[in-house]
Amino acid sequence: MIPILEVAGLKVSIRTDAGPARILDDVGLTLRKGRVLGVVGESGCGKSTLIRAILGILPRGGAVDAGTIQFEGENLLVFTEAEMVERIRGRRIGFIPQDPLLSLNPVFKVGTQMLEVMRRHAEGTRRDHVARLVSLLKRLRVPSPEAALERYPHQFSGGQRQRLLIAAALACQPGLVIADEPTTALDVTTQHEILLLLRELVDEFDLSLLFVTHDLGVVAELCDDITVIYAGQTVEAGPVAPVLRTPGHPYTRALIGCHPERATSFVGIPGSVPPATRMPPGCRFAPRCAEAETICGANLPAQAPGQDGVLVRCIHAP
Ligand SMILES: Nc1ncnc2c1ncn2[C@@H]1O[C@H](COP(=O)(O)OP(=O)(O)O)[C@@H](O)[C@H]1O
Ligand SMILES: [Mg+2]
């Protein structure tokens, strides 16, 4: 089956005061239709940069140096900004941001903001749009949906605001939804409710979901497939069950060791993600890897297929 989204060999640089920084250096992912793909890595690994590259909203000084981003069979990298606005963002790809307060304008009613986006992108009349929003908010269990549209963002709790943004992302009936750590700021109970809802919506609306998180527990709960990214390089990818059961890359193993509910004892990964301007050559995880050998600092191995359809990028992979 053709994937709905396929990123291959993606390299992205951003100009900084300390020179150009290669933020993404060979990232790939495959999201099949109707599935939920979790993209995981510590903070600073390049997850948000990857999403911005897909949506065509890299920060100033950012550029794609190599790679392809195929969405429903078209390479998004050849689209102009006008085409991305007109055809892709908000219309065929919905986006759920990390921080609902920053993404909603405090001075407009939430209904006004959501209807403005629909006026530009969705089929039908304003009356259709209001009806669709109300039914989405109902589905997302936002109390009194009609009244909710008349309120301002600060009048909602964090969890309710995140539900509003999910409704906004779905308002124009996109096939693909991309979410950047949408539950990170929420308490555990609210997070759990929203993850359950998202899973239901994927099946109900025939969506494909790209879900970015630093939390493997969230991946285990929500996702079908997983792509692990370290310092701008894809290190492991495959179905969630085999990757979490028998992780093939030392970084994936270290991440699982960091997850308090899975590990027998909480052991952090020594060191931290290097700043983008000072990336080591070869495998970027090598300086923190207990299993690294000299060659790891010289060569980045290709991703090799292992068992159960899992791809691993490590010289020690079987
Ligand atoms: N606009 C920018 N200018 C310079 N460096 C940036 C910029 N945006 C992100 N970076 C750097 O790129 C790396 C990846 O950042 P990001 O994509 O936000 O990671 P994540 O979302 O996984 O936490 C970090 O080292 C970050 O400091
Ligand atoms: Mg981020």
Image: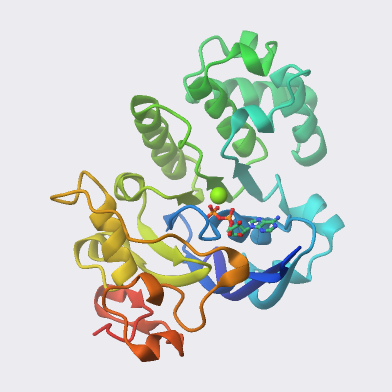
Taking the spot 33% from the left edge, 61% from the top edge, the residue there is 270
Q: Residue furthest left?
A: 264
Q: Is residue 108 left or right of residue 139?
A: right
Residue 279 in the image: state x and y as whole percent.
Answer: 55, 73
Viewer-closest of 13 and 202: 13
Quarter of the image where one finds residue 188: top left
The C terminus - image quarter: bottom left
Residue 94 vs 130, above or below: the answer is below
Q: Residue furthest right?
A: 82
Residue 297 in the image: state x and y as whole percent.
Answer: 43, 85
Residue 73 visible: no
Q: Is residue 147 left or right of residue 108?
A: left
Q: Is residue 258 left or right of residue 75?
A: left
Quarter of the image where one finds residue 79: bottom right
Quarter of the image where one finds residue 83: bottom right
All told, the count of numbered labels is 0
